[in-house]
Image (cartoon, rainbow, N blue to C red):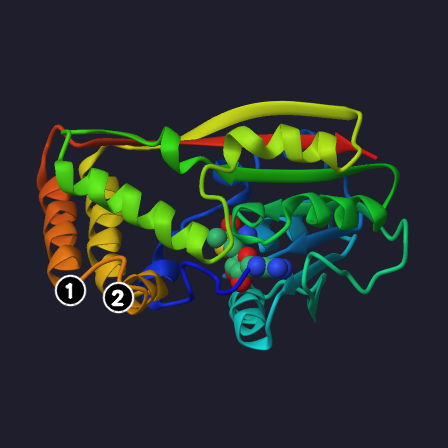
Amino acid sequence: MKRYTHGHHESVLTSHRWRTAENSAAYLLPYLRPGMSLLDVGAGPGTITMDLADLVAPGTVTATEYNAGALELTRAEAARRGTANVEFAVADVHALAYADDTFDVTHAHQVLQHVADPVQALRELRRVTKPGGIVAVRDSDYAGFIWYPELSELDEWLALYQKVARGNGGEPDAGRRLLSWAHAAGFTDVRATASVWCFANEADRAWWGGMWAERILKSEMATTALETGAAVPADLDRISAAWQRWAAESDGWFLIPHGELICVV
Ligand SMILES: C[S@@+](CC[C@H](N)C(=O)[O-])C[C@H]1O[C@@H](n2cnc3c(N)ncnc32)[C@H](O)[C@@H]1O
């Protein structure tokens, strides 16, 4: 990854802090037991991480981020919630500094779509997971997003996002590819499922649409789009206004599909 596409602007964190183990890791929950050790890579704002820590307590969650600044966000969430059974480390998922067979469960939510080599990332997660343990990954699939009304500016938004994310070395249409990446990494026992987020009521539309209206102007994605010439300011203004229109539309509906895998080591 040359650059993390979203960055950690407050407008990005607004969306990531909405996430819970229930709405983002339900496929993993049946496998968790008190006392397990769990590695969460790319923990970011850490809301899912702390839910997972509650579920495996008195076991420990090791939360990692690829730089110290991002890890501070995870630490802040642990402090806010008073989560005690969590440890922190800076780590790149491509090369983890843990011994083989260290964790019962390793987990990455919306991370593989951003990394330069998702197959290597999965090999590393497998290496540090105990035999019989689980590698759990979930990623959205941008080309599969569906929305209504059919605003052409949101088509522009999607194409721009895909261009910027790929320019950063990621693969935004990751959900459909997870199973192939797991097979390439050598997994043979893989349970592949899918689940969605759907934003369709007034509060969800105001939050999701308002968040993207700001994010397209102020987040790392905007900076990269302008720096690389993928967009000019007028493009971002037009897309931002369309997100506001979508949010105000009582018929507005948005669906985000995800691929998810339970890979047994
Ligand atoms: C979309 S966020 C997901 C955060 C969190 N898992 C969640 O779902 O709320 C992706 C995270 O992956 C991290 N990341 C990106 N590349 C990484 C890498 N090579 N190794 C570890 N983390 C990475 C980013 O810093 C970012 O916080």
Whether residue 64 is visible, yes or no, is: yes
The residue nearer to you, when weighing 264 against 185, is 185
Pointer 2 residue Cβ closer than 8 Å to ligand 1: no
Which quadrant of the view contains residue 143?
Answer: top left
Which residue is drawn at the image coordinates 48% and 65% (left, top)? 3
Percent position (x, y) of residue 126? 80, 43
Whether residue 46 is visible, yes or no, is: no
Which residue corresponds to mark 1? Answer: 233
The correct choice, above or below, for 248 with respect to 64 in the image is above
Percent position (x, y) of residue 210? 20, 52
Which residue is drawn at the image coordinates 67% and 63% (left, top)? 92
In the picture, measured across the screen, residue 141 lies left or right of residue 234, that is: right
Percent position (x, y) of residue 214? 22, 60
Position of the C terminus by quadrant? top right
Which residue corresponds to mark 2? Answer: 226
The residue nearer to you, when weighing 265 against 28, is 265
Percent position (x, y) of residue 197? 39, 33
